[in-house]
Image (cartoon, helix red, strand yellow):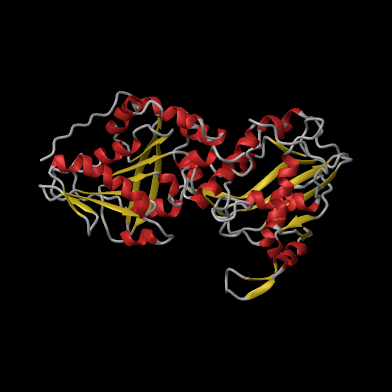
Amino acid sequence: MTEYSWYPHPGPQTEFCETWQDEVLYGGAAGGGKTDCLILESTRFINIPDYHALLARRTFPMLQEVIDRTRIYYPAMGGEYKAGEHRWYFPSGSRISLGHCQNDGDEYNYQGKEYQFIGLDEAGQFLPKQILYLFSRCRSTNPIIPKRMRYASNPGGPSHQFLKDRFRIEQYPQGNITFGELVEFDLGPVKIRENLFRVFIPAKLVDNPSLLDNDPAYVARLMQLPEIERMRLLEGLWDAFEGQVFIELNKEVHGYDGKKLVGFPPPEWERFRSFDWGYSAPGCVGWWAVDYDGRLWRYKEWYISKRDEQKGAWVGLKMSPAEIARGIKEREKGEKIHPGPADPAIFHPHRQAKNQAMGPPISEELGKEGVYFIRGDNDRILGKQQIHLRLRPGDDGEPMIKVNLDCEHWWRTMPELHEHPLKIEDVDTDSEDHLYDETRYACMSRPLRPSIRQSPIPVGSFAFERKRYIQARKYAERHGTSIVSAYGRVR
């Protein structure tokens, strides 16, 4: 039998292996030894016969890396690998399965399964609903074996915002803070109350001296990446990620503190509202003022939603059009608001929630309450370009859109939007894009013309490096080279 020893390095690796919480995210920079920690931590209870663990990656090609690394460690523990089953068997009868969720819906392949340990490597690449479904498979009927859900991930991917919210990374960016979520529900006549505990453990490259000793040039290679990738992979910053749409968005440039401005916006400025309809999904209303330069000032918002902690997402309040109209009028008392753009879908007959019969357009029902909208321009590509134009500072250093810092949901969701995986010129519609759509309607109702003479993007700037990275990614896909090699071939 092969002999092999592995010990976690002092610091975050050891902390990860010693955690007791129900859910633990070990995440951040590349090279922190996250995969090895998952692989070895999954073996903690292999001496108990009915122990069953699952290690998963999003796709099977990605999973192959995990399989290769288990071959380094598991034989020394008496493990025997059954390639046809993608499963390791240990002398006690315990098992560690290896799986993936390559396609939407593949999570249901695990229906009826029970795992006491689930480790998701590069968890950000999974879909949020896949993570939640797999979490439901993490159960234990053996009191000796705790149920443990463990995630290893760099920032980015479809579940970037989901993980950031679930582990309160914005609230606790330094991590290592345990917090609980009380879940209450009725199971027949029995009332269940259970606390689920979570903790985020940041990972840094310096936490894995083995990698630095064996490959000292690894840092140098990371330094060659464009800035956004370098920040994410080298520094582990969750505010910067590949595919981020509005990289130019900055609170210091585009935000303002409405509490400090008495009588703002001035009564002589035109005001209008924009609207994105939502019932089961969130809806939102934004109120805008237009100054004499055509600049848009978002001064308040209404995000028609609530936080569903079990789903780990914001969901709609299921309000009727009449209830929404009354809520809008209540928030507009004392103001003169012009009809603004809304989701074009509200101008078509819609199926009523109660009896599923076709009813009048939502716009008509809103109008009965005295709240009117105009049909928004739903050109997604031009709308995104209009937001970029307004975010870009002009010759005076000021952008053409300013947003009140009190608009917390706008500031929460807009920086987290990521590009569509197949159409990088659009926003991924699986992300929380309701406020983005509403903002897009507002900008398209007051379109700006691009400047005829635009200054070239300065070499070495953030925008220049990001554009170069996108070109390199396309080059790498076409020629089958690595991103690092491709990055050196494009300008």
Q: Is residue 474 visible in the rendered structure shown here?
A: yes
When asked about the image quadrant of residue 1, the answer is top left
Left or right of 280, for residue 207: left
User: Looking at the image, which residue sits at the far bottom?
Assistant: 357
When asked about the image quadrant of residue 409, the answer is top right
The residue lying toward the viewer, choosing from 217 and 258, is 217
Residue 185 vs 37, above or below: the answer is below
Left or right of 452, for residue 413: left
**Residue 43, position in %: x, y?**
21, 41
Q: Residue at x 46, y 27 (%)?
A: 220
Left or right of 136, for residue 386: right
Q: Is residue 43 visible in the rendered structure shown here?
A: no
The number of discs equals: 0
Q: Residue at x 40, y 45 (%)?
A: 123
Image quarter in which the C terminus is found = top right
**Residue 28, position in %: x, y?**
44, 34
**Residue 356, position in %: x, y?**
58, 74
The residue lying toward the viewer, choosing from 334 and 80, is 80
Left or right of 125, for residue 474: right
**Residue 110, position in %: x, y?**
31, 59
Residue 236 vs 275, above or below: the answer is above
